[in-house]
Amino acid sequence: MPHVIMKLYAGQSDEKKAALAEALAQAVIAVLGSREGAVSVGVEDVAPADWAEAVYRPDIVDKAATLFKKPDYNPL
């Protein structure tokens, strides 16, 4: 039962979010062999001014051991 949470800068259209969610779901299905109905994808908007404290610190710095793709920036 994979669940993917995508956090991104606020401002993307619902159409782009839906396309992103579908692409992520298809990647999960292809790589993990999950069935389509078992995959869910959430998209969370984050204000750019809040990114460092709302996403970067808790999800990237504090969970570095779980990252398989690390960013090349540091807003802190």
Image (spheres, rainbow, N blue to C red):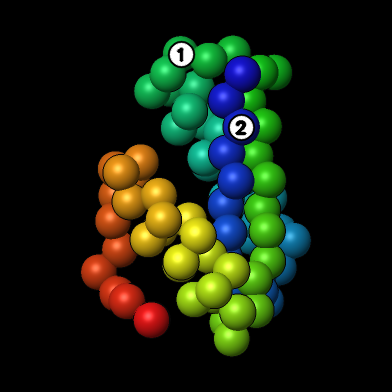
Structural distance between the alpha carbons of marks 1 and 2: 14 Å
Q: Quadrant of residue 30?
A: top left
| Disc assigned to residue 3 | 2
Relative to 32, is 20 above or below? below
To which residue does mark 1 refer? 33
Which quadrant of the figure contains the C terminus? Answer: bottom left
Single out the residue that lies furthest toward the front: 62
Q: Is residue 36 visible?
A: no
Relative to 25, is 49 above or below? below
Q: Quadrant of residue 39?
A: top right
Single out the residue that lies furthest toward the bottom: 49
Q: Disc 1 or 2, which lies upstream in sequence?
A: 2
Q: Nearer the viewer, residue 37 or 4?
A: 4
Q: Amino acid at mark 2?
A: His
Give the image location of residue 1, x and y in percent: 61, 18
Q: Secondary structure at mark 2?
A: strand
Look at 45% across and 67% down and name the residue there.
56
Look at 42% across and 18% down and name the residue there.
32
Q: Nearer the viewer, residue 52 or 26?
A: 52
Q: Amino acid at mark 1?
A: Gly
Q: Left or right: where does residue 51 sit relative to residue 56?
A: right
Relative to 33, is 58 above or below? below
The residue carrying pointer 2 sits among few (fewer than 14), some (14 to 19) or many (20 or more) residues within 10 Å by Cα, namely few
Q: Left or right: where does residue 70 sit relative to residue 30?
A: left
Q: Left or right: where does residue 45 sit relative to residue 58?
A: right
Give the image location of residue 27, x and y in percent: 45, 32
Single out the residue that lies furthest toward the right: 14
